[in-house]
Image (spheres, rainbow, N blue to C red):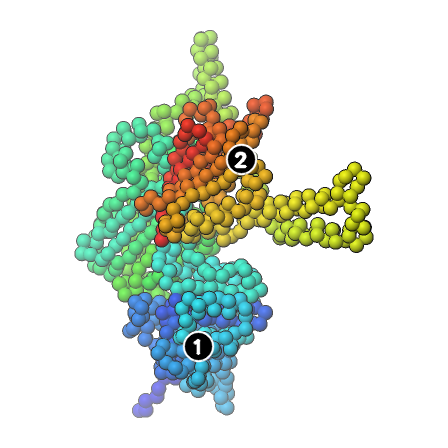
Amino acid sequence: MSKIPFTVSARTARLIGRENVANAEGAIIELIKNCYDADSKNTILYIDRENHQIIIFDTGEGMDDGIISEQWMTIGTDDKLNNAITRSGRIKSGAKGIGRFALDRLGSKCKMITFPQKSEIGYQWNVDWGQFELKGGDGRNVKINEVFADLTSIENSKYYTEVLKNIQSKSFLDIFLSIHKKSRVINGTILIITDTRDNWTDNNIEKVYNTLELLNPPEGEKRMNIWLIDPQQPHKFGLVDNDSFEDYDYKLTATYNKNKDLEVLIDIHRNEFDYNLIPKELFDYEEMKQFPFDEKTFEKENFQIKRNFSQLMKGFTDNKDIAKNIGSFEFVFYFLKNQYTKEDREKFYYKEFLGSRSKWLEKFGGIKLYRDEFRIRPYGEINTQAYDWLMLGERYGQNPAAFSRKGSRVRPNQVAGVVKFSRIGNPFLEDKSNREGIQDSETFDLFKNLLLNIIKVQEDDRSTIGFNLDRLKSDLDEDEKNLIESENLAKSSDDENESQKETQEKNKKLKKGVLTRDKKLQEKEDELATSRAMASAGIMISSFSHEFHGLKNNLISRISLLNRKIKKVVDESAFESPDGIKLINEIEKLNQQDQKIRQWIEFAIGLTKKDRRKNKKINLINYFQSFKQTWDNNLFKERNISFNFKFDEEESESLNTKISELDLDTIFDNLITNSVEAFTRNGGFVGARNIDIQILSEGKDVHLVYTDSGPGITNAYTKINDILKPFETSKTDDLGNQIGTGLGMWLVKSATDSNKGKLLLSRPKNGFKIEFWFKKIQ
């Protein structure tokens, strides 16, 4: 009996690889992960549709000829499994040894240039993936050991030099040189993939960018900078940001450091309710006297509790000893309601939030899994069955109770979350071979149930508060009583034998109910009309931004062109008319008006730019320098307004906070608008027109003090915080008709609340004053 070896055709090996990287997006992610595993701090992804080319550049540790032949060229190597930690302490994301087939998925040919650390020699590796489909002389498919790649050494050169030699794109080289300027590029790997297999559309590249944004957990440490370049749209993408979640109603952080008691530490931040507005009678209810609902804890907004697995999963007994398979993990869960009615806000004392959360959730929503700082797809993937992999929708369908009822459940379109764990600490949560998810097992099922019951902690907390606020509303709200009474009377048919006095009493109650309902309906109509108008204005600016850009560019040059043309056909001496009016002066006035229109168009278009909507580190000194210049050009000078901001030069580098420029604009554009209108309202303000902003460092916060020298808040407001309510305005015309939208100060408060800031209105002896506190970051 003879022994014969197993063999595998090159085509089979290639098919195995392709099955594991089913689409181009997944292939790119696999190669970006390789950059991470190589300890790269910088990666550039360049997708050139016109030349059918993809380039992936990194500044990692590179590869020598031994690593290329023994690991890179070996299918199914277990190197990353056995050597799971990189030199810098990263835990490698790969483990299957088949990621290099992502190159084949993207294009038919690939050139790799790599320079290893502490070596003067680099290497060039070339492969034509078509060789895997070749047939031998006898018509059979060639075997895997009959396919070769070309490997040559690169001597008397440097990685930096080879990159410059092989890449001509200015947009790529601009970023490459900026990386080199900060830290010399000595080693790393660049992959040049040609004859790409996919038709790369704008949407496909946008999808890759969105995936890269979510590749690392939003609150994790940013260990690798990634740039995406599309030369057909050179200004669209650039450095990939992984935004943190800021605008939430609830944030729950559950931390499990593996322990024999199976105890989980849970930290909850209630950010939904405005403590300052809630009647203190709420805390007279017995349930609201107990931790964590008591007044002191409620005011703090944050609290911690500990729960073991059995307390979280009621009735859980670990008969199969599965719980020990679950290692340390962290679960950060966010609840965000998409919308609310004015009635609900008044009943539940919600904090305001800005913009459309639905759009934000379309991108960042869902609960996502991350192993060693890299996302495991497809969990939480929008528009897939795996978006709601914890079956929150089915769970809500079984108990669709309102928020005001205990035990109410969240819906999948209201949540976002991040589950983080390590491959080393959780070997039982293992990838499927195709990298699309975790292998089904009893351990994974228990893990999912544990996450669901951690979510239940937030649900129970919120529904308990909702139940008691609803109860408080019923106890305090006269309008609600009027409506209920009038509805009951309208349904009643037992009125044949009632006395005249009883009829009159019923009529009074019905009138009160009708008036209350009309009032509520009118408020809703006003709110909807204003929201529609504001949304339409924003959509119009965004939709016609291209046309506005064209108009703006024409405004720059048209008067100069007109002036030159006139001078060619009209003698300059004829420019002055008999009545002394100089035509040249009139042309200059037109030019000044054009420049003003151009500045306002630029200002309006700037508000809709994508990068202004992102939360990022902002130095407030730099922000207000730009802010002052914009408003000086557009408004202050011609209205004789003095605008100044003050700060301590020694603290200028530390006056940073994390916020979007759009939110800062929302706050200070509205304050400026109010101040300017106060200076000019009702015949004008007599006195100096000063607007001052003071920026102070105050412990862990940046403290902003905004003042103006105008007439201040009118005495008609006995409670000055009323001006923060929506549709509240003191702006009237000469006949006393309200002409303001009543949204300016509401937007100021909303933008502050959504960024976890605090504000304080006061009524100084002269003028207007409002103060803000935002968290300081380094």
Would residue 317 be visible to someone looking at this image?
yes
Q: Position of 731 compared to 260: left or right?
A: right
Q: Tag 1, which secondary structure?
A: helix
Going from N to C along the chain, the mark reached first, 2 or 1, is: 1
Q: Position of 511 compared to 379: left or right?
A: right
Q: Tag 2, which secondary structure?
A: helix
Q: Is residue 638 above or below residue 156?
A: above
Residue ID at (36%, 37%): 273
Observer-nearest residue: 155 or 447? 155
Would residue 751 be visible to someone looking at this image?
no
Observer-nearest residue: 734 or 239? 734
Q: Position of 459 compared to 16: left or right?
A: left
Q: Is residue 680 above or below residue 394?
A: above
- The image shows residue 551 at horizontal and vertical percentages of 66, 50
Q: Amino acid at mark 1?
A: Tyr
Observer-nearest residue: 24 or 448? 24
Q: Position of 548 compared to 197: left or right?
A: right
Find disc 1 in the rendering and name its residue. Answer: 159
Q: Is residue 63 above or below residue 502?
A: below
Give the quarter of the image for residue 467: top left
Residue ID at (51%, 65%): 229
Label 2 vs label 1: CA separation?
58 Å
Disc 2 residue crowd, few under 14, some 14–19, many 20+, Cα 10 Å = many
Find disc 2 in the rendering and name its residue. Answer: 676
- The image shows residue 470 at horizontal and vertical percentages of 36, 31
Q: Amino acid at mark 2?
A: Val
Residue ID at (38%, 78%): 116
Quadrant where the N terminus is found in the figure? bottom left
Residue ID at (54%, 29%): 685
Q: Is residue 254 above or below residue 713?
A: below
Observer-nearest residue: 333 or 383? 333
